[in-house]
Image: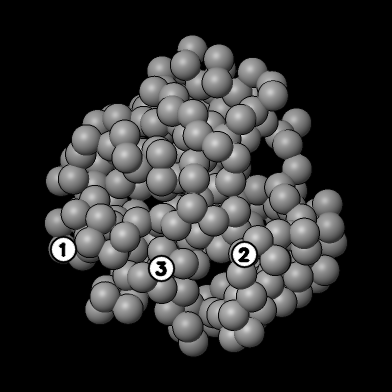
Amino acid sequence: MEISIVIPALNEGARIGDVVQTLLRQRPAALIVADGGSTDDTVEAAVRAGAHVVRSSPGRGAQLAAGVAAVRTDGVWVVHADTRVPEDGVRQVERALDEVPFGAFHLAIDHPARVYRIIEFGVRLRIRLFHLVYGDQAMFFRKDAYEQVGGFPDIPLMEDVALCRRFIEAGMSPHLLRASVVTNARRWERDGPWRRTFGNWSLLFRYLVLGHAPDRLLPHYQPEPPSE
């Protein structure tokens, strides 16, 4: 199964070129950067590196919906701009999507401190308890299954959780590959690892258990800092 890579981006001009070039070396069928209104040179850098760029209104849900809408292959792999993937990641995703409709990688955080190993354990616990995978785990899916469940909702927050729940409600639990993707630690370093982690869990609880709308949660969310 051929796959296309979709990268949501906002003010990632300092890193997007290298990310695109690195992923293109794995020879996906296409690579699409979904830009949410960057005010730096993200779009220009992505085009120079060889990506196809689509523009959308701000918000990760809208960006991802626009990016996936531009995909012409049967498989889709969503990779964040601050994430490193295995060197054979495209091949792993292609093989997985021959067998399953939806899945993700395990998560590793690019920092040697022990606290980050505890956070990684918490991610594994969340998957085990709730079968929920996040966007920073490089989610992948068949496009027909994605369309069957209604795709990414146009919401400013929790779009990855919402899509995962739609798959689960349709009887498609996420398939976890053995390999990990490595995410940049910049969010935890900026906010403090425990504050960021407990903040994320609090938002998830309010969204899933208390039923708070993403628009209501957005003021309490600390967005990712721009790339440096």
Left or right of 5 on screen, residue 180 = right
Question: As displayed, is residue 209 above or below residue 40?
Answer: below
Q: Mark 2 or mark 3, which has the lower sequence index?
A: 3
Q: Quadrant of the C terminus?
A: top right
| Residue 123 on image: x %, y % | 57, 73
Q: Element at badge 2? A: helix
Can residue 114 be seen?
no
Numbered mark located on residue 214 in the image? 2
Q: Mark 2 or mark 1, which has the lower sequence index?
A: 1
Q: Tell me how the rendering is colored.
A: one colour
Left or right of 212 on screen, residue 8 = left
Report crowding for label 1: few under 14, some 14 to 19, many 20 or more residues within 10 A (C-alpha). Answer: few
Q: Mark 3 or mark 1, which has the lower sequence index?
A: 1
Q: Quadrant of residue 157?
A: bottom right
In the foreground, 112 or 1: 1
| Residue 224 on image: x %, y % | 71, 47
| Circles 3 and 1 in contact, beta carbons < 8 Å | no
Mark 2 vs mark 3, foreground winner is: 2
Measure the alpha-carbon separation of dots 2 and 3. 15 Å
| Residue 126 on image: x %, y % | 54, 79
Report crowding for label 3: few under 14, some 14 to 19, many 20 or more residues within 10 A (C-alpha). Answer: many
Q: Element at badge 3? A: helix
Report the amino acid beneath label 2.
Answer: Pro
In the foreground, 96 or 196: 196
The residue wearing badge 1 is 99
Q: Quadrant of residue 81?
A: top right
Q: Quadrant of residue 58?
A: top right
Left or right of 82 on screen, residue 72 = left
Mark 3 vs mark 1, foreground winner is: 3
Report the amino acid beneath label 1.
Answer: Glu
